[in-house]
């Protein structure tokens, strides 16, 4: 039997991390002591007040369909959050609540992209950005960023990438996988460029609450009305409130775009989970001490991880300013033989670590840059110390 499958679907790249992840899980299932630095979610429990509100929603019968773009109570809570945290004024009509921030990004792309439109993406990038753009019939245009510039866009590179087909730019601050944060001055430059060239900005701010030291998160949409009109702000409950499995993301945009996003979602998935929406209201308006608790522990873990990585011969990293990831530079060990295995790529190094010392990491090629691996410090301090002890032992083995 012969058949033709979707050309678009066939062009979507499979995850290069699947082999590592699957093998690590299989090893753990056999009782092998694997230390994993792959986590893309907080290792903390959802705060009890949020869980309780979810239970209350079930018990009180709030288990039916809601409007496709979300309940009014959550939209109002999101509007208040934008006003209080970001100095952004939105109305409920500007807000679309989705099944996670990933769907919000996809909705945004579907609402603005026409076939062959180009979307600029920084490298290293979150793994789904290029694939979501391709699914929306767009073309990802990749800009390689520099570690010495904290992996952030430079205006010369944006100007070089600009064509008559450029429709949007992806901005992710705080950033996954690099932990970088854009300053107000840097955002102002990007905003001026976007307004001048009539370019949409998809601003992924999902790690907004997880910023460290004296850093502050600034939303590019807050700079002026012109950039606000061109910006689709994406956020959600997963990272700051340890609610990854609850699947609630949200976006804010001008009403024309918000209406399109809502319409798209109404046909694709309909409304987000009613229970999760009511729990999210409590997350946004309730006690915020759990956010500060998680942030404090993430910062302590980050400091230990960065110090330990930089103590390993041949490896190095910059101290991330936000999120919960560290990008480790492998350039000085690529091409070398370690424990009998030649390291030609980030995937080679990831396989080596898992096979030889039972440490799981994400190879940088998953993020578009083969000179790095990504470590997550969304794990216990004990795991961080033990995992990096093992990495140091094998890398420095003579």
Image (cartoon, rainbow, N blue to C red):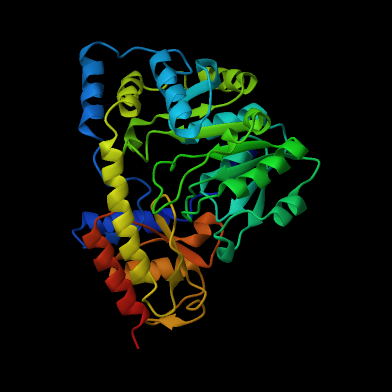
In front: 207, or 394? Answer: 207
Residue 184 at what x, y percent from top left?
57, 46
Front residue of 287/302: it is 287
Quadrant assignment for the N terminus: top right
The quadrant where residue 78 appears = top left
Which residue is located at x 59 percent, y 17 percent?
A: 259
Q: Kindly identify the residue that appears in the image at 43 percent across and 74 percent down.
A: 315
Query: Which residue is at a point 50% across and 56% down the rendered structure image?
Result: 366
Q: Is residue 80 visible?
A: yes
**Which residue is farthest bottom?**
398
* 278 sits left or right of 153 in the view: left
Q: Nearer the viewer, residue 162 or 76?
A: 76
Q: Quadrant of the C terminus?
A: bottom left
Q: Image height check: is 337 above or below 218? A: below
The answer to whether 155 appears left or right of 254 in the picture is right
Residue 269 on image: x %, y %: 47, 22
Given the current orientation, which residue lies at the most extreme left position?
31
User: Where residue 386 sits: x, y (%)?
Assistant: 24, 67
Residue 290 screen position, x and y as percent: 26, 39
The vertical placement of 329 against 90, above or below, is: below
Quadrant in which residue 206 is drawn: top left
Residue 2 in view in this figure? no
């Amino acid at each position: 039997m012969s058949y033709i499958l979707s050309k678009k679907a066939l062009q979507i790249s499979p995850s290069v991390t699947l082999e590592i992840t699957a093998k690590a899980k299989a090893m753990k299932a056999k009782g092998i002591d694997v230390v994993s630095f792959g986590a893309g979610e907080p290792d903390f429990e959802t705060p009890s007040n949020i869980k309780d509100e979810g239970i209350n929603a079930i018990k009180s019968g709030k288990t039916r369909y809601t409007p496709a773009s979300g309940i009014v109570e959550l939209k109002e809570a999101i509007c208040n959050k934008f006003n209080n945290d970001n100095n952004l004024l939105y109305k409920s009509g500007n807000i679309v609540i989705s099944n996670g921030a990933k769907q919000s990004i996809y909705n945004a792309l579907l609402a603005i992209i026409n076939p062959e439109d180009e979307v600029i993406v920084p490298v290293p990038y979150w793994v789904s950005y290029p694939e979501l753009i391709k699914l929306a019939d767009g073309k990802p245009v990749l800009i390689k960023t520099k570690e010495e510039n904290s992996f952030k866009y430079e205006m010369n590179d944006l100007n070089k990438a600009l064509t008559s087909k450029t429709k949007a730019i992806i901005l992710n601050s705080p950033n996954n996988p690099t932990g970088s944060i854009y300053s107000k001055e840097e955002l102002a430059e990007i905003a001026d460029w976007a307004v001048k060239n009539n370019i949409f900005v998809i601003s992924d701010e999902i790690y907004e609450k997880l910023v460290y030291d004296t850093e502050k998160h600034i939303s590019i949409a807050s700079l002026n009305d012109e950039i606000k009109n061109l910006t689709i702000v994406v956020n959600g409950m997963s990272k700051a409130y340890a609610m990854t499995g609850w699947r609630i993301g949200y976006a804010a945009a001008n009403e024309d775009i918000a209406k399109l996003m809502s319409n798209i979602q109404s046909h694709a998935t309909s409304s987000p989970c009613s229970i999760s929406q009511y729990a999210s209201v409590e997350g946004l308006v309730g006690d915020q001490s759990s956010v500060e608790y998680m942030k404090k522990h993430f910062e302590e873990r980050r400091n230990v991880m960065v110090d330990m990585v930089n103590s390993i011969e041949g490896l190095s990293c910059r101290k991330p300013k936000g999120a919960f990831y560290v990008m480790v530079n492998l350039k000085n060990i690529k091409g070398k033989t370690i424990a009998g295995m030649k390291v030609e790529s980030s995937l080679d190094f990831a396989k080596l670590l898992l096979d030889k010392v039972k440490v799981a990491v994400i190879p940088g090629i998953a993020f578009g840059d083969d000179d790095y691996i990504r470590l997550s410090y969304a794990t216990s301090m004990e795991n961080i110390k033990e995992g990096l002890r093992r990495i140091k032992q094998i890398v420095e083995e003579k």
